[in-house]
Amino acid sequence: MKKFLTWGGLAFLVFFVAFRPGEASDVVGNLAGGILDAANGFSTFFTNLVT
């Protein structure tokens, strides 16, 4: 079952990038932005903790 889900997810990813590249780049950009926001939050927290 795990192998089926892995291959299915990979096939969906290839399909999504091939046929909807604009939306795929938006999704990646939003994920990267969210990760960056979280990293900035942790950075601010630890900076305030030290000072």
Image (cartoon, rainbow, N blue to C red):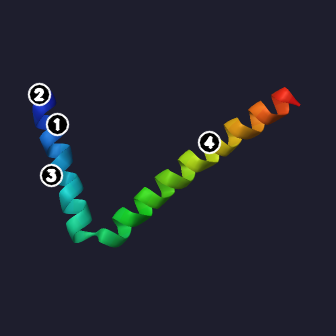
Image position of 51 (left or right of 21): right
Residue plotted at (22% across, 70% down): 19
The residue indicated by pointer 4 is 38
Quick one: 29 or 48, which is closer to the camera?
Answer: 48
Spatial separation of the CA atoms under disc 4 and disc 3: 30 Å
Q: Which residue is mark 1?
A: 5
Q: Which three-letter amino acid code belongs to the residue tagged 3?
A: Ala
Who's the residue at 59% across and 49% down the image? 36
- Please state which of the two labelled residues, at mark 2 or mark 4, is closer to the viewer: 4
Q: Position of residue 46 (x, y in %)?
A: 75, 31
Q: Earlier in the sequence, mark 1 or mark 3?
A: 1
Residue 3: image x %, image y %? 11, 32
Report which quarter residue 6 is drawn in. top left
> Sequence order check: which comes first, mark 3 or mark 2?
2
Q: CA distance from mark 2 to mark 1?
A: 6 Å
Determine contact: label 2, label 1, CB under 8 Å. yes
For residue 8, above or below residue 13: above
Camera-near label (1 vs 4) is: 4
Mark 4, other Cα within 10 Å: few <14 / some 14–19 / many ≥20: few
Q: Position of residue 40 (x, y in %)?
A: 68, 45
Q: Which mark is residue 28?
A: none
Q: Which residue is mark 2?
A: 1
Q: Which image quarter holds the C terminus?
A: top right
Left of 1 or right of it: where is 26? right
Q: Would you name the residue on which mark 3 appears? A: 11
Question: Label 3 crowding class (10 Å Cα cut-off): few <14, some 14-19, many 20+?
Answer: few
Q: In the figure, residue 5 lies in which quadrant?
A: top left
What amino acid type should be assigned to the residue bearing mark 4? Ala
Per the image, label 2 sits on a secondary structure element best described as loop
Mark 1 vs 4, N-terminal side:
1
Label 2: how many residues lie within 10 Å, few (<14), some (14-19) or many (20+)? Answer: few
